[in-house]
Amino acid sequence: MLLVTGATGLIGSELLTRLTAGGEPVRCLVRDPRRLGAERVRVQIVLGDLADHRSLANATRGVSHVIHLAAASHDQAGGTIEELGSIATWRLIEAAEAAGVERFSYFSALGAGRGAPTRLLRDKAIAEDAVAAARIATTTFALSLAHASPDPLFTAIDACSRVGVIPVPGTGHYQPIGVSDIVEAVVAQLALPPRAEHQRVELAGPQALDLRTISRLIGSSLGRRRPAVPVTPGFAKTMLRVAASGAVELPMVWDRQALLGAEMIAPSGSADALALGVSPRRISDLLGLD
């Protein structure tokens, strides 16, 4: 039995579909089962959240492998970034060890570090340390900017470009990688026998690009060749609220607490994905520009 947290997210939803299609028995920790869509009838469901230690104990009971995707990119009513991030991860590891779980996979971000520019990336580094120190087999998947169409960045640029400009509130560099390529690499890694020592797998696309270039490529894929204009984060947030009537999620790369201005680059490029038999596509291919 696999436990998946974050199964309703951008990566988790596609990974969950892949796991259930392969016949894996899966349990999901969720607050709202309706967000699982059609998959809710194919999985076991534990109602709860990361802030409730009782939920974690119930979710890990009888599980052999925990796949921990859930996190928060900003403070929420149910907890802060840290409470829903590193603290929850530490508690989930404790629950997994107590339940006899054999394997734990954690999803982090390239650029995570104690001196990173944002709270989320600093908290990811603390969580990574907790995972690496666990008494069971562990793997950290460190991701660059994950892309799927639509995703929050794509949707935000779609909305803003309709009013004539693409706002660029940050100067970070990323190696965009398709969600489907991430899922392929993760499934390949999960099929390998676990190792006693902690493993860190870096998943990044083949191109290192700044946020302005990525934004312009998304605009081109929408058929809107708009100027990509540097703006303050506050102006970008206001523009998005006006352009989308408040209905569009703020992209993590525009969020001061999340990934804004991050350097999410893998020193070895796509080497870890290639070693797993996956050749990540360029973002222009993912956007259908080539």
Image (cartoon, rainbow, N blue to C red):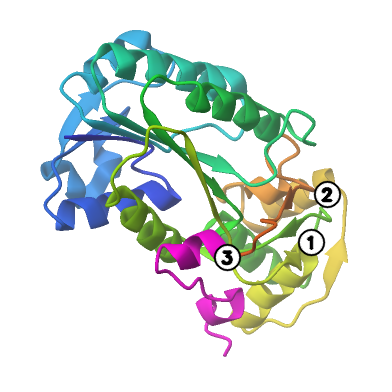
Measured from the top left, where is residue 40 in percent x and y? Answer: 18, 42
Residue situated in front as seen by the camera: 284 or 255: 284
The numbered mark at residue 218 is none
Q: Is 278 within the magenta?
A: yes
Q: Nearer the viewer, mark 3 or mark 1?
A: 3
Measured from the top left, where is residue 253 in percent x and y? Answer: 69, 50
Residue at image location 47% in from the left, 17% down from the top? 90
Kindly report the distance in space between the C-alpha atoms of the residues bearing marks 2 and 1: 8 Å
**For numbered disc 3, what is the local secondary structure?**
loop
Provide the residue designation for mark 2.
Answer: 235
Measured from the top left, where is residue 249 in percent x and y? Answer: 57, 47
Position of the N terminus by quadrant? top left
Task: Check the image and report above or below for 278 versus 41.
Answer: below
> Which class describes the residues within 10 Å of circle 1: few (<14), some (14-19), or many (20+)?
many
Q: What amino acid is at disc 3?
A: Ser
Residue situated in front as seen by the camera: 11 or 254: 11
Residue 78 appears in the figure: no
Q: Nearer the viewer, mark 3 or mark 2?
A: 3
Provide the residue designation for mark 1.
Answer: 167
Q: What amino acid is at disc 1?
A: Pro
Task: Check the image and report above or below for 210 versus 225.
Answer: above
Classify residue 193 as left or right of residue 266.
Answer: left
**For numbered disc 2, what is the local secondary structure?**
helix
Kindly report the distance in space between the C-alpha atoms of the residues bearing marks 3 and 2: 34 Å
Q: Which residues are magenta?
A: 271-290
Q: Are marks 2 and 1 in contact (CB under 8 Å)?
A: yes
